[in-house]
Image (cartoon, rainbow, N blue to C red):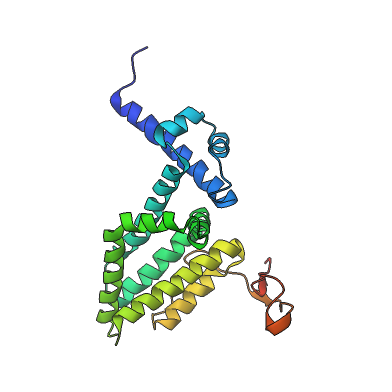
Amino acid sequence: MSPRSAQANEVMREQSMERILAAALEVFSEKGYHNATISDITTRAGVSRGLITYYFPGKQNLVDKLLDRYIDSVTGIMDVTGTPDERLAAIVDGVLSTVSQSLAVQQMTLSLVIHPSTHGLFAQAEARKEAGVRRLEDGLRELFAARGAADPALEEVMLRSVLEGVIFKAAVYQDQYPLERVRRRLYEMYGLPGPKTALIQDDPPPVYVPARRGKFGMPYTSSPGWKRVTP
């Protein structure tokens, strides 16, 4: 049997790395960074521990790679063309599409950001990707300036805050979150022409379920206050 070519070896290497990263993402999103182990990832990926540590010497190396990819996908959303309104609509759609297609990434990132012991890992990733993050911020400010905003810098902060809130809620409530209705509401907020077709899928009509209130009016549970109805 003839030896594999260098190209075939590279393909196998990439496949192995992707398999490991996919398994690591699932484990991190389910268990969190601290509770996840290399053994968990080995079992999920169906590979030897030696193969994982060959590509990724430690757990942090896996998280670093996954975070770098996530930040690249977010900053890459700015690469759109058209009128200012068309670009803004494309950015909103790009973020929401990413959310709907990669909830595990959002869950992993959220767990890293909100926990003090792991927030530094996300901060380090942002520092590694500083150029892309800065390009995103500057691009949004330029976009709002082109739309005639009185304070483009504030509009950039507000849009990112709203979208990050959407990402947070979608990661927590997953398929219960009305992503398509949120999308249409964002279009209304920014005076954009309403989308003609659903980006993700049409949400079923909501049924409001009042949450029981405790002292100071706070809900007893983390229920979002509504549930989906099966058509």
Q: Quadrant of the N terminus?
A: top left
Residue pictured at 54% horizontal, 65% vertical: 170
Q: Position of residue 155 (x, y in %)?
A: 35, 80
Number of numbered markers: 0
Q: Quadrant of the C terminus?
A: bottom right
Any part of residue 80 in sight = no
Residue pictured at 36% horizontal, 68% vertical: 90
Q: Position of residue 173 (x, y in %)?
A: 60, 64
Residue pictured at 40% horizontal, 64% vertical: 94
Q: Position of residue 139 (x, y in %)?
A: 27, 70
145 over 98 or under it: above or below = below
Any part of residue 156 in sight = yes
32 over 139 or under it: above or below = above
Of all residues, the one furthest to the top in this rendering is: 1
Q: Position of residue 34 (x, y in %)?
A: 55, 48
93 over 159 or under it: above or below = above
Of all residues, the one furthest to the front in this rendering is: 117
- As drawn, is 36 to the left or to the right of 80? right
- Quadrant in the rendering for residue 80: bottom left
